[in-house]
Image (cartoon, rainbow, N blue to C red):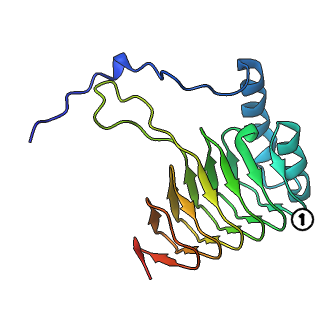
Amino acid sequence: MAIMERSLRGFTGAGYDKGRTLLVQAAWFAVLRLVFVRWWFPARWRPALLRAFGARIGQRVLIRHGVRVHWPWRLEVGDDVWIGEGAWLLNLEPITIGSDVCVSQEALLCTGSHQRRSSTFEFDNAPIRVEPGAWVAARAVVLRGVTVGRGAVVGAASVAHHDVAPGAVLTTGVAA
């Protein structure tokens, strides 16, 4: 087997558009770090703050402290959604979360990756969709390009690297 030689110095990020100006990106990161993630910032104000930065957020959405959202303008959340403490929505590409979804504590939804066969490790990003009624349990990971089907469960500490069928339960990487 040939070993891939990498030259990270040559990374260009070709084709990736952050979707907003550098000023808006900087403003979001300041608000995220100084206010949004803090325990003292009221949960009922977090959806409004995300909306101010371009997110589409439904009604009765609960976002706990410590939640990180990379780019709010690439986030769509339905009604009656819960996002638990420490969850990370690393949305270089869009993340769509349907209604009645629970994203539990310290879950990671990661739309970013890299081309493993690229010597310069270029991006290989893709959106994530979590359909209505699904549950992404504590410390679960949903990777780029995955759809978590309606009513499906990505169990605690599981990694969803392929679509999870509607109603399926994924535990430690095996759908049941």
Tell me what residue is drawn at x 58 percent, y 79 percent: 167
Tell me what residue is drawn at x 77 percent, y 60 percent: 64
Q: Which quadrant: the C terminus?
A: bottom left
Answer left or right for 30 relative to 111.
Answer: right
Q: Nearer the viewer, residue 14 or 84?
A: 14
Which type of secondary structure does the marked residue at label 1 adopt? Answer: loop
How many badges with numbers are in the image?
A: 1
Q: In the displayed image of the protein, which residue is found farthest to the left?
A: 1
Q: Amino acid at mark 1?
A: Arg
Answer left or right for 169 relative to 89.
Answer: left
Q: Which residue is mark 1?
A: 60
Q: Quadrant of residue 25?
A: top right
Whether 169 is drawn above or below 125: the answer is below
Question: Residue 160 at x, y = what percent?
Answer: 47, 63
Answer left or right for 119 relative to 41.
Answer: left
Q: Which quadrant: the N terminus?
A: top left
Question: Residue 39 at x, y = what percent?
Answer: 79, 55
Question: Residue 131 at x, y = what percent?
Answer: 67, 65
Tell me what residue is drawn at x 76 percent, y 19 percent: 23
Q: In the displayed image of the protein, which residue is found farthest to the bottom?
A: 176
